[in-house]
Amino acid sequence: MSSPATNAKHVAQAPGERSPGVGGKRLAKAFEKVSRMPALDESRRRLIRITEGQGSSPGDISEAVESDAALAIAVMRAANNGDGPSARVGGVREAVDALSPAEIRTIAGRVDTYDTFDAAGMRPAAQERFRRHAVATRYAADRVAEAAHLGQRDELAVAALLHDVGRLVVVELYGEEFAFRKECPDERLRREHRELGIDHALVGAVLVRRWGLKPAISTTVERHHSPEAGGHAAAVRLADAIVHHAAGDPVSADVLVSAAGRLDLDTVALRALVYEFPHAGTTKRRSTDPCPLSQREVEALRGLSEGKVYKQIARELNLSVSTIRTHLHNVYRKIGVVDRAQAVLLSRDRGWI
């Protein structure tokens, strides 16, 4: 079985191109071009303005960074490759905590931009299409994660933003017409394998690894079209399909149902997600405040939020009632509340349950 690196080299060689080493050079140039992708001018302007403000919170800065995949890439690479701590960060909020507002402002200032309303008509169509789909998928993935009770949602947000970055590489190699045909995601993958011997998900994962981001993110990018994937990859697969469906693109109902099933979401939950997504902009923003609770404390609190009594929660978690009581008292102490109602309201507002 060939390795991802071997397959990635293969994609760079166009049909009929036989010169040794040419494919690798073309791929390297495509990777470099995509690594320097421009951000929407308005996105960068807003991020710089926020970092200049005295009262800007890390959450505000994180939200501005996540408004554009190019900004998220620049900030995540800086935090993971020398401008921040040595340990890899998984989400934008971690990167923002590792870098000062001044550093983020400098990083943003180095990112090239394009203007949607450029009078010269020179805005990169593929980049704008990619940005809009990436941000929409990030929103949808967060809704999916909320419904499926998935953790590490900041890391999921980065993977959702970058899930289609391989399509930009394909654009550089074969043009927009090849990369952005209107077709079902699964059909696109089959066509890429048939005509290129590779797919954009694998190429994107190779690029994400080159950027030095967490392996879990590149794995999600690589597997986000796999019917067997679970966890974050299944969440991105479902979110991607929901966004395409909302845009009127061809989407197989089987893909929606299959991805939802991998997350233990029934058809009732799936219908709600598909129905609600066009209104996602009116929902509360995902909290980027780090959750101070342990996994068991979150599970106990979630049971409480569902109206269960200590005995029910203990039975479902295979713990004693006294242990559940201790977990919940720890929850109250850690988040500074005095009763279950306050604990549930605060935790829901911050996206912890």
Image: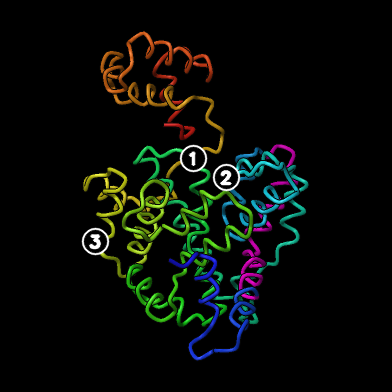
- Which quarter of the picture shows residue 288? top right
Q: Looking at the image, is mark 2 or mark 3 earlier in the sequence?
A: 2
Residue 47 forms part of the magenta stretch: yes
Q: Which percent across, then down, holds residue 30?
A: 61, 74
What is the chief secondary structure element of the magenta stretch? helix
How far separated are the C-alphas under marks 1 and 2?
8 Å
Name the residue at 72% across, 46% down. 51
Q: Which mark is residue 253?
A: 3
Residue on which disc 2 sits: 91
How many residues crowd around disc 1 within 10 Å: few (fewer than 14), some, or many (20 or more)?
few
Image quadrant occupied by the N terminus: bottom left
Identify the amino acid type marked 3. Answer: Ala
Residue range (magenta) = 29-56
- Which of the numbered marks, if any, corresponds to residue 205? none
Residue picked out by circle 1: 152
Q: Nearer the viewer, residue 324 or 37?
A: 324
Say whether residue 322 is magenta. no
Q: Residue furthest top?
A: 322
> Which residue is located at x 52 percent, y 14 percent?
333
